[in-house]
Amino acid sequence: TRLGGPGVAVLPVRARHLLRCPPALALTIGRTWKVGKIGNPGDPTRNAGAVILLVPKETNSEGRGRCFVLTGQGTEGFITDATAGEICREATPSFASRDYASGLELVTLRTAQRFATEVLALIARIGGTS
């Protein structure tokens, strides 16, 4: 059952050719897996989702790992490109030591914390409780 709220999808990617265009891959994943809220045009929470992509260096023909936190339109206000980069850089030590599970856990946690902060701020703005 689809809840219709914000969402996060995490995907380790083994094939480098899938990442020729990370935003296009994230868009396909987001639409296929229905990540984020489906809303009407103008709804600020429409497409409030994020897709986390990781390419381990061992499976990348470039010989380096890649981490992406790609956001839907409704998420761009609180997870900017700069924030996404900071989130991935924080996990770099885990990725460098091949501890991909811990690295992905940290990236997912930081992304989820951004969502939680945004939801709490929205609740405060409308004066409700949850």
Image (cartoon, helix red, strand yellow):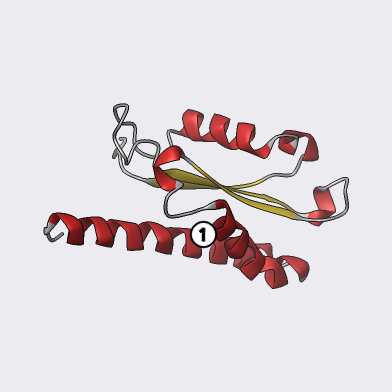
Q: Position of residue 20 (x, y in %)?
A: 75, 35
Q: Is residue 114 left or right of residue 92?
A: left
Which residue is outermost to the left?
A: 128
Q: Quadrant of residue 1?
A: top left
Q: Is residue 82 left or right of residue 7?
A: right
* Front in this rendered view, residue 56 or 118: 118
Q: Name which residue lies at 43% across and 33% down.
A: 34
Q: Is residue 129 left or right of residue 62?
A: left
Determine whether 40 is above or below 95 in the image: above
Residue identifier under label 1: 108
Q: Position of residue 16 (x, y in %)?
A: 79, 40
Q: Name which residue lies at 38% across and 56% down.
A: 115
Q: Quadrant of residue 84?
A: bottom right
Q: Name which residue lies at 70% across and 67% down.
A: 92
Total marks drawn?
1
Type of amino acid under label 1:
Thr
* Front in this rendered view, residue 115 or 95: 115
Name the secondary structure under disc 1. helix
Q: Position of residue 54 (x, y in %)?
A: 67, 51
Q: Position of residue 106 (x, y in %)?
A: 55, 67
Of the 4 image quadrants, the one containing the C terminus is: bottom left
Q: Residues within 10 Å of mark 1 (few under 14, many from 20)?
A: many
Q: Name which residue lies at 48% across and 59% down.
A: 111
Q: Quadrant of residue 48?
A: top left
